[in-house]
Amino acid sequence: MTRMLRWLKHQFNLHMDKEEEAKTIESIVKNVSFKGANLWILAFAIMIASIGLNTNSTAVIIGAMLISPLMGPIMGAGLSLGLNDFELLKRSLKNLLIATIISLITSTIYFLLSPISEARSELLARTQPTIYDVLIAFFGGLAGIVAVTRIEKGNAIPGVAIATALMPPLCTAGYGLASGQWLYFAGAFYLYLINCVFICLATLAIVKYLKYPKKAYVDELRGKRVRRSITIIVVVMLIPSIYLAYTLVMENRFKDNANKYIQQVFEEKHLTVIYKKINYKGTSSSIEIAVLNKKISPQEINNYQQLLTAYGLKHTQLVIHQPSDSTLDINTVKNIIMQDINKDKDANALVIAEQLKQLQAQLKQPAPQQAAYPVAQVSTEAYTLFPQISSLSMADHVRYATTNTEAPADTLTVITVKVKKPLTKAEQEKLRNWLNKRLALKNSALWIQ
């Protein structure tokens, strides 16, 4: 076991092929400044990324990320925190601010002039951060700084630029400014800040691990003030970052549980969910759904509400949208969805389009007419043949295929029989055959209570 540990320590040793510390610091510091060619390259890259987002072209967006020099000042900030170099920190943050402003101005101008105003999927994907964005930024930052500190740089840096994706959120923020959609701007800029902070923290972690020499100050008092200031900055960055990561983990867990709840409680019970919205707000979260061709009673809603706890959704409110009659027409659902869009501009247009498409496919199929059965007469006849029966009821249920929305609907007649004492299997079969023949039924189900 000890030999294995020694072997692993040797294999993962970051000190083996490490570049000279002075050369690594010089390399990072050189890429901190934004002036001259760097600013032009940044503006061109932002323009390319904006075009890619506007036309929904993944390849163009990746190309723009490869060109972008945005990683420089972020790594510079992380390095400065590790070296206790306050001057380098100020310079890095100043250049990062300049780069951010230039990027926002460039992307805003492009989207103001662009004839395509629709938000496509590539753009919408950058409006709401998740825990995966945090993980990508942190591990991407680790890969980037490890590559920079090597003698052989390899091809990690371009990959890190693509993975951490600093450009698209900035361009999306510009789209939000240009179109006046402030929630788009806030969500995208928040994602950009997350990337910056976690790349910076990853750089700081590796610089500390490799024990880079801290900057020495002739004035010891000034040195203490700088070290104290750097410590405060690191703590201020770490605490919100940990809270953010925790919040995003809880939100993702809530959404996973909510989707599982909707699938198992509604969809697997042959209820067609044509609209759903999952709202995570801590202890005041909610799930909104609309179900096709099913009138849900208050008692059923209460039962569904109680099931939420079993799926880890305590303190969650279930909201079921339904009209006053037993079917949900397309105009009703459209109104629900449009009201939701007006309340929340971040609604995913593609998801909504798919929901409406599925709804329209269902509504193309006319629901079979409810048959009028002579229930009273059949009940009397059934009691004569089977004295064990105390009551009998029947109703038609519209049945849709769950795997093929284009398949025609059919009708299943459900007959519910309450008995005073149990029927034998032979008696149950005899009753089923008699009812099918008496009512000329093709599709029926007998339920004995």
Image (spheres, grey):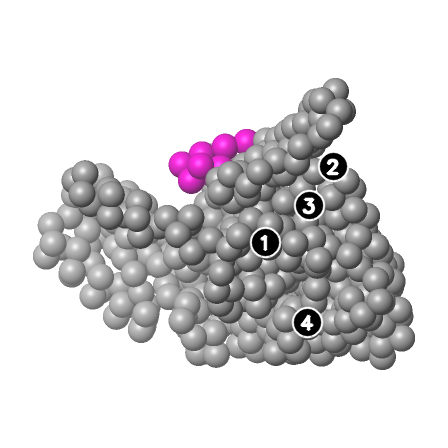
Quick one: label 4, few (<14), some, or many (20+) residues within 10 Å? some
Of 401 and 369, the residue lying toward us: 401
Instruction: Decide whether residue 168 is among the magenta residues.
Output: no
Residue type marked 4:
Ile
Q: Establish if 420 lies above or below 23.
A: above
Q: Earlier in the sequence, mark 2 or mark 1?
A: 1
Density class for disc 3 (Cα within 10 Å; few <14, some 14-19, many ≥20) is many
Residue beneath label 2, please?
A: 86
Q: CA distance from mark 3 to mark 4?
A: 21 Å
Does residue 278 appear in this view?
A: no
- Residue 333 x %, y %: 66, 61
Q: Closer to the camera: disc 2 or disc 1?
A: 1
Helix, strand or loop under label 4: helix
The residue at 30%/48% (across/down) is 10
Q: Residue 67: which disc?
A: 4
Residue type pointed to by label 3:
Ala
